[in-house]
Amino acid sequence: MAALTIAANAKINLYLDVTGKRPDGYHDLVTVMQSISLADTLTFVRVAGEGIKLDTGGVLPADDSNLICRAARAYFAKTGKPFGLAVKLDKKIPMQAGMGGGSADAAATLRALNAMDGNRLTAAELCEIGAGLGADVPFCVVGGTRLCKGIGEVMEPVPNRLNGTLVVAIGGEGVSTPRAFAALDDLHGDFRETAGDANPAALLDAMENGDLHAAAPHFRNRFEEVIEPIRPAVGQIKEILRAQGAVAAMMSGTGPSVWGLFDTSAQAEQAKVALIQAGARAFVCGMVQEI
């Protein structure tokens, strides 16, 4: 059977706030997530028999701890009709960087298997499977620009007409998501009194109008208040981005990735050079509205 090659797009958070902590320990979020052109590439081939053979090039485990394998097994459990599968991963999204790389790979696996299986499941059904794999997986299934609430599973598409060029940079080590949430819980008393000020309306209006400079004051990531003090590279990268002319610069997710938005691609390319010279990994990319 012919191979199916699919992109697994990374994501960034244009807005991320925590509004409360649930009795089950999970947190309620308000976030605007955005697909970007930086992507892993996955190639799928249907093979005889059953089982999943994964080739990660040695950069990641190729067993059931990998979200690609878990996504495939979850898909087959849903359909009840497993088939043999060989998967090759070309990893481009930095790992453990707050850019949803593992979630993107899982989502791409769900979309690819569904395509190979005659589009048996709807997008909503794929998102339902994805929710059992990770909070960001449903978004990565549908992609684009979406306002997400709950633990990320309640999504609605929102228009984004911003025309800036992105630079995404990573320097230093990240902080695990559980540790980041625990630090916020400590700072905010387990959110017993809801943060209450999560309101991305001004940002959404500016995005719909395509006004990057109007949007700039309204990008937000609550995790910066607990991550920047213990990961100085985040603040240093933001300073470099702004010094190079970024209209806005902000950490994505729980870091350590930081994005900057520039008016022109020339500015973005210059910023990439400056960041690499400072010892960071840096990528110039665009915002993707359809995956």
Image (tube, rainbow, N blue to C red):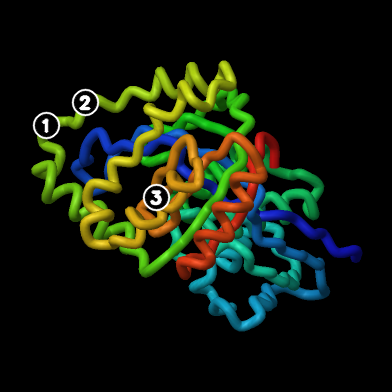
Q: Which residue is mark 1?
A: 193
Disc 3 from disc 2: Cα separation: 27 Å
Q: Are the residues at dot 3 and dot 2 in contact (C-beta closer than 8 Å)?
A: no
Question: Does dot 2 land on a helix, a strand or a loop?
Answer: loop
Coordinates of residue 41 in the picture (x, y in percent)? 71, 62
Dot 2: within a 10 Å radius of its alpha carbon, few (fewer than 14), some, or many (20 or more) residues?
few
Q: Are the residues at dot 2 and dot 1 in contact (C-beta closer than 8 Å)?
A: yes
**Can residue 197 be seen?**
yes
The type of residue carrying mark 3 is: Lys
Q: Residue at x 68, y 78 (%)?
A: 55
Answer with the quarter of the image where residue 104 lies: bottom right
Q: Residue at x 41, y 18 (%)?
A: 202
Q: Residue at x 43, y 29 (%)?
A: 216
> Which of the two labelled residues, at mark 3 and mark 2, occupies the earlier sequence position?
2
Q: Which residue is mark 3?
A: 238
The type of residue carrying mark 2 is: Gly
The type of residue carrying mark 1 is: Glu
Coordinates of residue 90 in the picture (x, y in percent)? 69, 69
Disc 2 from disc 1: Cα separation: 8 Å
